[in-house]
Amino acid sequence: MSKNTMHLVQTKGLIRTDKNYKNLLQELKSIIAKGQLRAYKAVDNIKVQTYWQIGERIVREELKYKNRADYGKYLIDNLTVDLGIKRQRLYEFIQFYRAYPIVRALHGQLSWYHYLCLIKITDDKERSFYQNQAILNSWSYRKLQGQIKNNLYENTSQKEIEEIFKAKLPPVNKYIGYYRRNRQYEHEKDTIGLIICREAGKEEIV
């Protein structure tokens, strides 16, 4: 091994054990992890909005031909083939829209998997209870799934349920403000998901 090669190996070893380098490495890993999380969140918010729009458009089309009993079935049959989307998924989009006919009712903290759990609940009050709990407690969709499976709603007193409904949820624009302050880089523009959420909200962004 030449002297230059040995010197290079020693330098690499010294850099790796240097405190400043370790701090830099940790910081870069944190930036990468946050970036991956931001990308996931942004994509998921767009998915939620897109799936809602698909459901709304299909329902609107069905209503135009509501006098034709089998039209909805044939419509889904054709869309499944032409869009390459599974029949079950299209019905989930329709169910999603019917459970949340007002786009402003969608919350930026909830992912598509959260909504998949929620739309299976037929009772509006029960669904709202779990939705509020998921937002207030920052539940993952697996946590939400578990609480539904364990019948949290049925095991909660009416008084507690009413208190949960009275609790003020963090508005969508508060969520956007938090994202901008803590997750978004200075040079970074708003994602499509954030723009949609902002336009749907009423409160001022802080």
Image (spheres, helix red, strand yellow):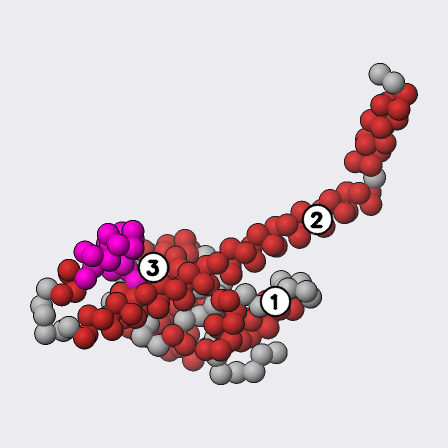
Q: Which of 188 and 202 is in front in this view?
A: 188
Instruction: Count neighbours of disc 1 (C-alpha within 10 A) and say few if under 14, some if 14 to 19, many if 20 or more.
Output: few
Location of residue 65 (image quadrant):
bottom left
Q: Can residue 18 be seen in this view?
A: yes
The tag earlier along the polypeptide, 3 or 2, is 2
Residue type (three-letter) at the residue carrying disc 2: Leu
Q: Does the magenta stretch include residue 55?
A: no
Marks 2 and 1 sit apart, C-alpha to C-alpha, by 21 Å
The furthest residue to the top: 1
The numbered mark at residue 44 is none
* Quadrant the N terminus occupies: top right
Residue at the outermost right position: 3
Does the magenta segment cover residue 83?
yes
How crowded pointer 2 is (Cα within 10 Å; few <14, some 14-19, many 20+) is rated as few
Percent of width and height locating residue 118: 33, 63
Against 154, is 32 above or below? Answer: above
Of the two numbered discs 1 and 3 in the rendering, the one whose residue sits closer to the viewer: 1
Span colored in magenta: 75-93
Which residue does the image show at 46% across and 63% down from the upper left?
45
Residue located beneath label 2 in the image = 28
Outermost residue toward the front? 82
Q: How far apart are marks 1 and 3 (CA)?
A: 29 Å
Q: Which mark is residue 116?
A: 3
- The Cα–Cα distance between marks 3 and 2, rounded to whole angstroms, is 34 Å
The structure residue drawn at horizontal position 52% and vertical position 69%, both measured from the top left corner, is 194
Q: In percent of the image, x 19 and y 62: which residue is there?
A: 75
- Tag 3's secondary structure? helix
